[in-house]
Image: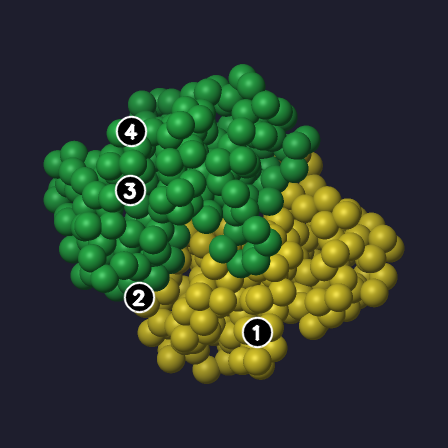
Chain colours: A green, B yellow
Amino acid sequence: MKIQVAIDRVDLARATVLASQLDGLVDRIELGTSLIKDYGLFALADIKAQLNHATLVMDIKTIDEGVYEFKQGYAAQADVLTVMGTADLATIQAVYDVAQEADKEIFIDLLNTNKEQIKQLLPFTNATFGLHHSHDNARQFEAADAVKAFHQEFPTIRHIAVAGGVTLEQVKKLTADGIAEVAIVGGKIVGQPNPVAAAKTFQEVTKK
Amino acid sequence: MKIQVAIDRVDLARATVLASQLDGLVDRIELGTSLIKDYGLFALADIKAQLNHATLVMDIKTIDEGVYEFKQGYAAQADVLTVMGTADLATIQAVYDVAQEADKEIFIDLLNTNKEQIKQLLPFTNATFGLHHSHDNARQFEAADAVKAFHQEFPTIRHIAVAGGVTLEQVKKLTADGIAEVAIVGGKIVGQPNPVAAAKTFQEVTKK
């Protein structure tokens, strides 16, 4: 399983330093929605050149104007872009097509989707489906249990990621279960006094 | 009824010129999602100082991390910020509270929401509810008919806006019906050879 570190709510200089420091330690580096909305894709486009190893995810959270946003995002050197599962199906189809043509990854964020909506997304077999517990929702969320339940309900979905409440303990469980491909960790790495050490600890657990 | 001009998919210099030119001609100027994602809120923060009349809307389309995004958006001098109706209810409550405390306007974008979701939003009585036909969806959309049907279904909603397919003909109908407070027009003003003339034509129709 891969660790994706989400960098969010820091200034651009700090984001750039963090991305460089974490490159090679974790598989995927995410520039979070806050960075995109605060600084814009044009300002983030230089970060990719500093990465030698990591896959670069830009959490653009597209919900409309899909073709425009995905073209802009890939032009800003993203390897992976996100679209909301609650978007109009026409938007998701449009960005899926852009991703396939560009030979890039598309990540469908399932935040606040229901089962009926997810069923409509099943044909997008090459997408990564991201289980996502809202930052703003205080309800308890067990990442590993959620992934298992999701896999049971939608066994044909091949690429699963999970975000929200992903602790070290949860990463151990997720690794043991072997269902999720990507676990997304934010503050538990970048919010620590030593993000490099925290990243190594998380990455280490996925090897066991 | 007020006209809101959406400025989208142009470069920052052009957006700034358009905002200045249209200030005073239309009631509300919207910096669209594409401008926020391309350039970021920090870069857009200077535009408000150039406006002497218009209400400034930033179409931030918040879907998570509500408090952070709304604080950033109002700090960037937005008078109005948007949140997706498909967001977690906790997110919508959080941004509603930020807006109320800041004494600013909140706009709930109903793109791809269903009736059950809208019912849950009824307590947010001070919000503007935006009927929104996806850019990426080719289905026919009659703005005035949609507003009338929506008002019949949700008679307690006080502030209604509509976006998508808002032609001059539709603005005439919307004005005559007197239900919608705001009609959002994009390319039919800013995509014209003479946006100032187009804006005047649209604004004129709302006076009749």
Instruction: Please tell me the numbered disc located at residue A202.
Output: 3
Q: Amino acid at mark 2?
A: Ala
In terms of depth relative to the viewer, which is nearer, B117 or A90?
A: B117
Q: Which residue is located at x 62 percent, y 24 percent?
A: A153
The residue tagged 2 is: B43
Horizontal relation, residue A93 to residue B76: left or right: right
Which quarter of the rendered picture does the N terminus of chain A lie within? top left
Residue A175, quarter of the rendered image = top left
Mark 2 surroundings: few (<14), some (14-19) or many (≥20) residues within 10 A: some
Instruction: Please tell me the numbered disc located at residue A208.
Output: 4
Q: Are marks 1 and 2 on the same chain?
A: yes
Horizontal relation, residue A199 to residue A58: left or right: left
Q: Which residue is located at x 19 percent, y 46 percent?
A: A22
Q: Considering the numbered disc 3 on the image, is that residue within a helix, a strand or a loop? A: helix
Q: Tell me which label, 1 or 2, sits earlier in the chain.
A: 2
Q: Amino acid at mark 3?
A: Phe
How far apart marks 3 and 4 lie (CA) works out to 11 Å
Question: Pointer 4 indicates a residue of which chain?
Answer: A
Instruction: Please tell me the numbered disc located at residue B99.
Output: 1
Vertical comparison of B138 with B127: above or below: above
How far apart marks 2 and 4 lie (CA) works out to 45 Å
Q: Amino acid at mark 4?
A: Lys
| Eye-nearest disc, 2 or 4 | 4
* Residue A124 percent across, percent down from the top left: 50, 22
Q: Considering the numbered disc 1 on the image, is that residue within a helix, a strand or a loop? A: helix
